[in-house]
Image: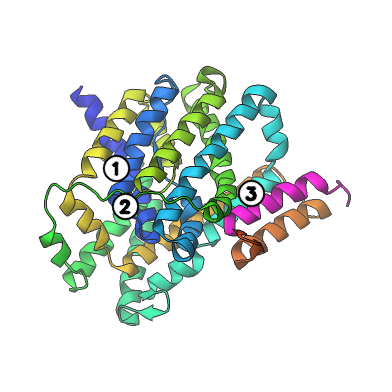
């Protein structure tokens, strides 16, 4: 049991950096991200009959939509909207159960998936650059020269670990870069420790109460298409590592349902939506330990950390430039994965249909286009995903 617990703690360590970054960027409570991930993972394991070694953590696809929704409708309406996105998973689970996986492949070919992933990465490029310069929105909160020094240091440490680190360290470059940047900022006196001193060791995190707002929900629901695509790919990837076909047993419809319930739970308590983590798949490849129970241990540790007040105060004290520095590489990497998706599938951009889908999706998603239909709005990742799917379905294959 002790060995399994240590392995579970290692899994949490691998997922941790990315998991808490999402709430820190969106203004949500990091404690709720930990609690939502922990509860979501355990629920996922129950629904999939403890057969799939997957850990659920905060989804990057929702960062920009959450920021927009929080400003437009407030946190309570945003939580309702995030809760509703879980039902998208149930819809696709039902489609797969009745129509089979081939239907999903036709709906989400690489020419659709690739540019949507690129949009997820590039949609926060402006925020990452601003934070690296010490800016919160349009306000300079840290001297620009100091901010650039801190962000550059964090960025360089992240790069060094990603390229020259050991196999295990290469799984957590974001976390190590953030820790090193935080230490430097603390030494230079740019870490406010007052909240850390005031925080208690044990603290029940604040639970948000969702407020029904269908405008916010309709805006957010299309965004879930991206993590659904990500989920399907992740289940196939972990299956390739463990030499098991999880799309057959317990079935892709069960894994999608488990992820969907996890998303709903996260929205109900005030955390960001959860999704499958490829970092964890990488850890399994290295450690050769694919036991499902270590994911359960990781989830238990995440839940326990959610109630450590001082720990969450430390997370919220991370200076903006430190976060900006690691974000440059992290979200650039996500965008690069989108490009890799197109390259691996050998998408021919001399084909006019492919060119139109990719170019239109990128500009609509990255450019911040908002489509209003009365009380309903579509924007960002959600709008670009819908556009890519529609164009792929209606455009003929002509050069």
Looking at the image, is mark 2 or mark 3 earlier in the sequence? 3
Q: Residues within 10 Å of mark 3 (few under 14, many from 20)?
A: many
Element class at badge 1: helix
Q: Is residue 138 left or right of residue 5?
A: right
- The answer to whether the residue labelled 1 contacts the one labelled 2, judged by CB atoms less than 8 Å apart, is yes
Q: Residue at x 36, y 57 (%)?
A: 158
Residue behind mark 1 = 13
Residue 90 shows up from this direction: yes
**Depth order, front residue of 305/17:** 305
- The answer to whether residue 47 is magenta is no
Location of residue 146 by image quarter: bottom left
Element class at badge 3: helix
Residue behind mark 2 = 175
Q: Over which residues does the magenta segment extend?
A: 379-399
> Which is the main secondary structure of the residues drawn in magenta?
helix
Location of residue 7 by image quarter: top left
């Amino acid at each position: 049991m002790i060995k399994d617990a240590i392995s579970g703690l290692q899994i949490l360590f691998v997922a941790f950096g990315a998991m808490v970054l999402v709430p820190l960027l969106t203004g949500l409570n990091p404690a709720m991200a930990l609690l939502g991930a922990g509860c979501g993972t355990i629920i996922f394991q129950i629904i999939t009959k403890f057969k799939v070694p997957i850990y659920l953590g905060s989804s990057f696809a929702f960062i920009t939509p959450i920021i927009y929704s929080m400003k437009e409708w407030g946190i309570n309406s945003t939580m309702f909207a995030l809760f509703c996105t879980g039902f998208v998973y149930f819809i696709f689970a039902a489609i797969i159960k009745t129509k089979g996986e081939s239907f999903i492949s036709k709906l989400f070919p690489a020419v659709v998936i690739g540019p949507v992933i690129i949009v997820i990465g590039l949609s926060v490029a402006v925020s990452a650059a601003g934070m690296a310069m010490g800016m919160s929105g349009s306000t300079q909160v840290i001297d620009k020269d100091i901010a650039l020094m801190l962000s550059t240091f964090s960025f360089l440490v992240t790069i060094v670990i990603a390229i020259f680190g050991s196999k295990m360290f290469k799984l957590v470059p974001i976390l190590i870069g953030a820790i090193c940047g935080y230490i430097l900022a603390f030494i230079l006196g740019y870490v406010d420790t007052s909240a850390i001193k005031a925080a208690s060791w044990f603290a029940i995190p604040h639970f948000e109460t969702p407020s029904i707002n269908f405008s916010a929900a309709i805006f957010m629901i299309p965004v879930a298409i991206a993590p659904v695509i990500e989920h399907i790919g992740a289940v196939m990837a972990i299956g390739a590592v463990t030499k098991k076909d999880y799309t057959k047993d317990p079935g892709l419809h069960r894994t999608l349902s488990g992820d969907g319930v996890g998303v709903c739970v996260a929205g109900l308590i005030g955390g960001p939506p959860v999704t499958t983590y490829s970092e964890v798949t990488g850890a399994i490849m290295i450690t050769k330990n694919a036991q499902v129970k270590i994911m359960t241990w990781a989830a238990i540790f995440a839940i326990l950390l959610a109630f450590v007040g001082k720990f969450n105060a430390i997370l919220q004290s991370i200076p903006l430039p430190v976060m900006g520095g690691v974000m440059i590489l992290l979200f650039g990497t996500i965008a690069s994965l989108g490009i890799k998706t197109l390259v691996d599938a050998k998408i021919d951009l001399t084909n006019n249909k492919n060119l139109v889908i990719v170019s239109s999706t990128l500009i609509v998603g990255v450019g911040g286009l908002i489509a209003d239909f009365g009380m309903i709005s579509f924007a960002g990742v959600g709008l670009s995903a819908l556009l890519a799917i529609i164009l792929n379905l209606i455009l003929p294959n002509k050069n």
